[in-house]
Amino acid sequence: MKKSILLLPLVLAACGGGSGSGGSGGGGTLPERAAISDTTIASNAAITKMVSEMGISSDGGAIVNSGRAASGTFNHNGTIYTTYRLDDVNFKSLLTTGATDRMRLQVDAGGRITGIRFINDSHQPQPPELFSNIARDGETNQFKTNLTEQGPTTFTYDSYGATLGLKYMDFGVIRAEVGGQTFDIPFAGGYEAARIKQNPPANVYTFTGKAAGFLMDGSGDSKNIATTNNGATLVIDQSAKTETLSAAFSDWYDIRVVNNFGIGAITFTTSNKTGTGWEISTPTANMQNGGHIGQETILFELNAYSENGKGAPTEASVLFNYQTKDTSSINVMLGFGGKTNP
């Protein structure tokens, strides 16, 4: 049974690692009395630079920081908009080998972020406190709780999306300080209304950004890794039906992950090793996404976004997990976020 990586040494031993502003529909801005407050926007900006609220009309028009009626809809210049706030965003995080966990921001009635919560979809929610609301510490980007076995634990929401200029999605790490260790748990996600759900126009889309996350071996030792802000790229080739993530780590490998979604196969390769330790044996080629070969595991999840979820994507994210097939049982937990024409 899968559990959170906060208990990962136990899991590996027991389970072998199985696991734009403006818009159409009348244009203009809403009356100030209807807008989400500047105070709330400033408070949320200490955590994420994603828009605190957006309104989307049926024809795809968008108004940023729009103002939400009790019903979740409003009429602006004769056009009906449905509004979304940060608590509507379904983030995904890499807490578990071979699976993702949802992560939700908690907000109050005025839209201010008050907490964070992980939601388990496919495995035992352990430790249970991790899957309850974790309260925000004042106006900071930290969230604190007390885990039964590990004791007081601080989670720092470190948004790289803010530096990268992402607007409709966010990407970064949740820096978990647990039992004397620090894990940079990658996360990514965005507004569902802005997520592209159908194949975009046939083209090649290149996103430049950052990759970050952590490595962990079977004994529980860990290492946080990150590229520079423009040290990673994602290329979506609609004609070739491939998604290629490339990243250069100054103290690990240069990596390349090719998701051939046309046949549902992933190939992960490494080169130019730097630093000491954390070597991995050659991964098996053409592994099934989300599949296992013995304890070897691979997972690749991509999402792309535009202002209204239509047309060409402007922002994209990837969550990638690989567990080695050798006895070192090294887990690679990585996230990527980037945008076109950075």
Image: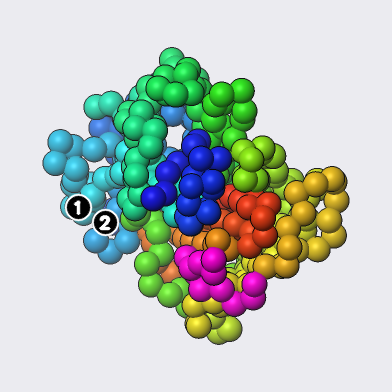
Left or right for 256, reference 59: right
Is 76 colored magenta in this rendering?
A: no
Please state which of residues 277 and 300 is positioned toward the viewer in this rendering: 277
Coordinates of residue 71 in the picture (x, y in percent): 14, 41
- Chain part drawn in magenta: 284-294
For residue 20, say whether it is visible.
no
Q: Is residue 283 visible?
A: yes
Disc 1 packing (10 Å; few <14; some 14–19; many ≥20): some
Q: Is residue 312 left or right of residue 183?
A: left
Ranked by sequence position, the earlier of labels 1 and 2 is 2
- In the image, what residue occupies the spot 44% across and 29% down? 44
Colour scheme in use: rainbow
Say whether marks 1 and 2 touch (CB < 8 Å).
Answer: yes
As drawn, the residue found furthest toward the front would be: 14
Residue 289 lies within the magenta run: yes
Q: Nearer the viewer, residue 315 or 94?
A: 94
In the picture, the quarter occupied by the C terminus is: bottom right
- Residue at 66%, 37% (x, y): give it: 221
- Residue indicated by mark 2: 57
Up-down: is 173 above or below 336? above
Disc 2 is placed on an element classified as strand
Q: Mostly what secondary structure, the magenta segment?
A: loop
Q: Which mark is residue 80?
A: 1
Q: Position of residue 74 (x, y in %)?
A: 19, 44
The three-letter amino acid code for the residue at tag 1 is Ile
Q: CA–CA distance between discs 1 and 2?
A: 6 Å
